[in-house]
Image (cartoon, grey):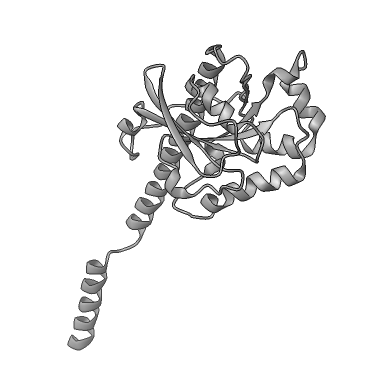
Amino acid sequence: SRKGKESLCPVSNTNVLPTEKLRPLPELRIVLVGGRKTGKSSCGNTILGRELFNTDTQTACCAENRAQIGGKTVAVLDTPGCFSVTSDLLAPACALLLVVNVSSSFRESHEEALEKQLEAVAGAGGGTRPWSRAVVLFSHGDWLGDTSIERRIESEGGPLRRLVDRCENRYHVLDNRRRGCRAQVEELMELIEEALVKERLDALRRGDRVWKSVSSGAEQRPDAVTLRQRNRRHQLSQFCK
């Protein structure tokens, strides 16, 4: 896994949402997003450590399975290649894994397809920011051999580099042939949880800024009762002249 260095500074507890909102969540939900034949179902099985998703046929509809990973319930949602992510799927503890087959060339058409899958939730409003909880997951990691994933990303150029950048340099490689290697899954879980914590901290900061802006405006702006009292005093003074 790789993630650009970024310090998660503590947020002041003055005028912000309760800090209990940052307590560990009991369940983590992962949505696998990507085109056909990218290996989403195999990745789901590797993450959960069991053969739960059917890998013999293409995924025609959404399927969800659960398992305990590191003392936490992890739910994985496998989606069809044409699936569009909607806001009702994105619970607070939900991450998006954008599955890319590392053995195939990643073109602009693939980039546009992933953007289209996420644009429904991005345009839904309500503060939903899908890219802030997205991780690029490279499947078929065994294909890389001695080549580093960084070299592979650079060799692919524009579309793949832009996708990784939009995910704030969060990416991970899974070797589905080494399903018994749980270290690769543990690293992925750490990367996902870091992304979700950062998003929640950013949400607290945004809420803090909005609260301060509203509070400042309220202090500068007289309330309706005060305005009515001033108008009445003015009318009375004019009447008594």
Residue at point 53% right, 28% down? 44
Residue 48, visible in the rendered structure? yes
Q: In the displayed structure, does residue 195 sit left or right of residue 140?
A: left
Q: Position of residue 41 (x, y in %)?
A: 56, 31
Whole-percent x, y for residue 122 in the image: 54, 50
Residue 66, image quadrant: top left
Where is the N terminus found, in terms of image quarters?
Answer: top right
Residue 127 appears in the rendering: no
Dividing the image into 4 quarters, which one contains the C terminus? Answer: bottom left
Who's the residue at 49% across and 49% down the image? 86
Q: Is residue 145 left or right of residue 230?
A: right
- Judge left or right: residue 206 versus residue 131: left
Residue 215: x percent and y percent? Answer: 35, 51
Numbered disc total: 0
Q: Toward the viewer: 209 or 203?
A: 203
Based on the displayed image, in which of its 4 quarters is residue 27 positioned?
Answer: top left
Relative to residue 184, is residue 18 drawn left or right?
A: left
157 w.r.t. 144: above or below: below
Which residue occupies 65% across, 26% down? Answer: 139
Residue nearer the viewer, 163 or 224: 163
Q: Nearer the viewer, residue 132 or 189?
A: 189
Q: Residue at x 61, y 48 (%)?
A: 82
Picture layout, residue 107 above or below residue 241: above
Residue 145 lies in quadrant: top right
Rendered location of residue 209, percent (x, y):
43, 45
Residue in the foreground of this view, choosing between 224 and 160: 160
